[in-house]
Amino acid sequence: MDERIVNAKDHICRSRRTDPETSKSAAEDHRPRANTHAAEVLQAIERYAGDDGCTAAEVGVVLTDLGHIEAQRRLSDLTRIGLVSKGPPRRCGVKGSRMTTYRAGGSP
C-alpha cells in the first residue's frame, strides 16, 4: 500500500464526535478497505488526471470499480491530507453535469 496513505491512516474514514456508536464502529470496521480504496483512487488520479483533472464519478466508475460515492469519500480524505487538490469544475463525462475536478498533489 502507498506509504503516504499508511502515514495518514487517522484521516481516512473517520467518524464525527456526534455520530452514534454504531456509526463509529462501522467507520472503524471500514478503515482497512478505506485505506486500500484511498490508495487505489490516488493511483488513478496520479496516472490519469492530467491537466483537466478527474471528477469523482469518472474515478469511481471509469478508472476504478469503487463507484461514485466511495470515490468521492476517498477524494475528500485525500484532499484533507494534501495528496489531492480540487481543480475547477467541468462537465463530467459520466454524470453529464458540472462537477469538481481533482488532481494529484496539494493546493495549486
Image (cartoon, rainbow, N blue to C red):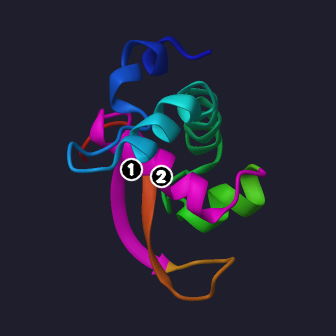
Report whether 95 appears left or right of 15. Answer: right
In the rendered structure, which segment of residues is drawn in magenta?
65-90
How many discs mark residues in the rendered view? 2
Residue pictured at 73% horizontal, 52% vertical: 63
Q: Position of residue 98 (x, y in %)?
A: 47, 84
Q: Position of residue 9 (x, y in %)?
A: 41, 21
Residue 105 in view, yes or no: yes
- What amino acid is labelled 2 in the image? Arg
Task: Give me the C-alpha separation between circle 1 and circle 2.
Answer: 5 Å
Quarter of image, res 61: bottom right
Q: Secondary structure at mark 2?
A: helix
Q: Position of residue 94 (x, y in %)?
A: 69, 77
Q: What's the mark number on residue 76?
A: 1
Few, some or many C-alpha atoms within 10 Å of disc 1 (few <14, some 14-19, many ≥20)? Answer: many
Residue pictured at 25% horizontal, 47% vertical: 108
Q: Is residue 5 above or below residue 84?
A: above
Q: Secondary structure at mark 1?
A: helix
Q: What's the mark number on residue 24?
A: none
- What amino acid is labelled 1 in the image? Ser
The foreground one among 91 and 57 is 57
Q: What's the mark number on residue 73?
A: 2
Q: Is residue 105 above or below residue 20?
A: above
Residue pictured at 30% horizontal, 35% vertical: 82
Residue 104 in view, yes or no: no
